[in-house]
């Protein structure tokens, strides 16, 4: 089995008019975090062992970007979503990045977490996406 490359996956954001998905320029590391919360099911009968029951799963996406401006339908669109607290459909696609290559899709909130202004380096930005609804596509799991 061949290894998959991280560069074969890219993030896309739905356009404001809802007709297309656009790829923000300057994408770097992309991470989809999935964790499962556990609840204690221990009782006095378990004799000091904290048994656990699986609960809700938490999903978030982290995207590092070196903005390639102007990028009205990419990075600037993400800035607008961050400021407005509006949800938008976010996709992750595998190469060759066609409409049929979606491996993750979800209505999500956008948070522009950090901007790094290091002397002598390109400006870097970090974005985090949190789900507003259940993913409609999630084939990475």
Image (cartoon, rainbow, N blue to C red):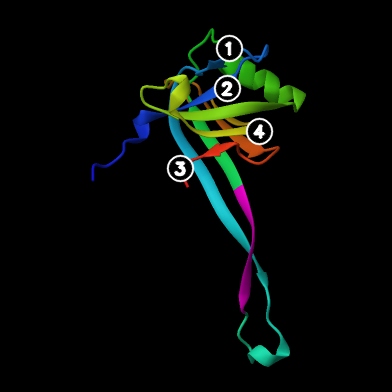
Q: Which residue is mark 2?
A: 13
Is 140 placed above or below 90 here?
below
**Few, some or many residues within 10 Å of mark 4 (<14, 14–19, 20+):** many
**Few, some or many residues within 10 Å of mark 2 (<14, 14–19, 20+):** many
Left/right placement of residue 70 relative to residue 15 reads left
Q: Is residue 117 visible?
A: no
Residue 122, how many percent across, how many down? Answer: 45, 20
Q: Which residue is mark 1?
A: 73
**Few, some or many residues within 10 Å of mark 3 (<14, 14–19, 20+):** few
Q: Marks 3 and 2, Cα distance to the nearest angstrom?
A: 18 Å
- Pick whichever of labels 4 and 1 is earlier in the sequence: 1
Q: Marks 2 and 4, Cα distance to the nearest angstrom?
A: 10 Å
- Pick whichever of labels 1 and 2 is earlier in the sequence: 2
Given contact means CB atoms under 8 Å apart, are the residues at marks 2 and 4 in contact?
no
Q: Marks 4 and 3, Cα distance to the nearest angstrom?
A: 17 Å
**Few, some or many residues within 10 Å of mark 1 (<14, 14–19, 20+):** some
Magenta stretch? 51-58
Is 136 placed above or below 77 here?
below
Given contact means CB atoms under 8 Å apart, are the residues at marks 4 and 1 in contact?
no
């Amino acid at each position: 089995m061949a290894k998959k490359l991280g560069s074969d996956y890219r993030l896309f954001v739905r356009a404001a008019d809802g007709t297309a998905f656009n790829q923000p320029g300057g994408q770097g590391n992309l991470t989809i975090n999935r964790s499962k919360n556990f609840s204690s099911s221990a009782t006095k009968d378990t004799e000091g062992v904290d048994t656990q029951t699986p609960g809700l799963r938490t999903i978030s996406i982290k995207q590092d970007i070196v903005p390639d401006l102007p990028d009205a339908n990419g990075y600037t669109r993400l800035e607008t979503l961050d400021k407005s607290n509006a949800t938008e459909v976010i996709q992750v696609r595998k190469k060759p990045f066609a409409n049929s290559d979606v491996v993750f899709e979800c209505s999500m909130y956008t948070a522009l977490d950090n901007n790094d202004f290091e002397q002598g380096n390109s400006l870097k930005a970090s974005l985090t996406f949190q789900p507003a609804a259940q993913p409609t596509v999630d084939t990475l799991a």
